[in-house]
Amino acid sequence: MANAASGMAVEDECKLKFLELKAKRNYRFIIFRIDGQQVVVEKLGSPEENYDDFSNSLPANECRYAVYDFDFTTAENCQKSKIFFIAWSPDSSRVRMKMVYASSKDRFKRELDGIQVELQATDPSEMSFDIIKSRAL
């Protein structure tokens, strides 16, 4: 089990789409899933989509990795952005799925250079907009 999970491949598209989100701001968010022995892009959120669109895109009973580009204004009235990595692992998902996602998370995250904040969530309340906002400031 551990050997299979630690040898998880990351599809090149995952890294390319992340670079586009980071550098060109082509996407608001990216949702990734593990398919067999590799991490693949499941959904790309357009820049017009908001946080509700993102959170509604996560399945209620399956694990996912996600990256969200959060724009905010500081107390000094400066426009800023932070890139969040979210490990979505709902309590209702299968134990084996949770184990595979947990054991592959660090290796996958290392492939995405530029993550500023990491969040682990097991239900929507753990990644509410208010929590995202407080972690960004």
Image (spheres, rainbow, N blue to C red):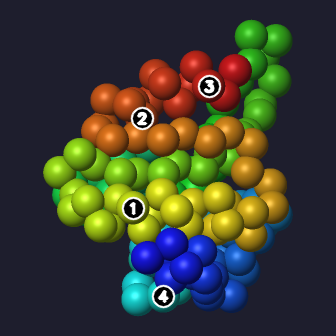
Please tell me which residue is depicted at 31% across the width and 29% down the height of the picture. Answer: 125
Indicate which disc, 2 or 4, sits on the residue closer to the N terminus.
4
The answer to whether residue 120 is left or right of residue 126 is right
Q: Quadrant of the N terminus?
A: bottom left
Indicate which disc, 1 or 2, sits on the residue closer to the N terminus.
1
Please tell me which residue is depicted at 74% across the width and 70% down the height of the picture. Answer: 111
The answer to whether residue 19 is left or right of residue 103 is right
Q: Tell me if residue 57 can be seen.
A: no
Please tell me which residue is depicted at 73% across the width and 51% down the height of the picture. Answer: 115
Q: Which residue is under mark 4?
A: 37
Please tell me which residue is depicted at 68% across the width and 88% down the height of the picture. Answer: 12
| Mark identifier at residue 135 | 3
In the depicted view, which residue is nearer to us: 87 or 83? 87
Q: Which residue is under mark 2?
A: 127
Indicate which disc, 1 or 4, sits on the residue closer to the N terminus.
4
Q: Which residue is under mark 1?
A: 99
Using the rendered view, name the quadrant where residue 100 is placed: bottom left
Alpha-carbon span between mark 1 and mark 2:
20 Å
Residue type indicated by callout 4:
Gln
Alpha-carbon span between mark 3 and mark 2:
10 Å
Residue type indicated by callout 1:
Met
* Image location of residue 20, percent across then percent down: 73, 71
Q: Residues within 10 Å of mark 4 (few under 14, many from 20)?
A: some
Whether residue 42 is situated above or below residue 129 in the rendered picture: below
* Image location of residue 81, percent across then percent down: 73, 39
In the depicted view, which residue is nearer to us: 15 or 92? 92
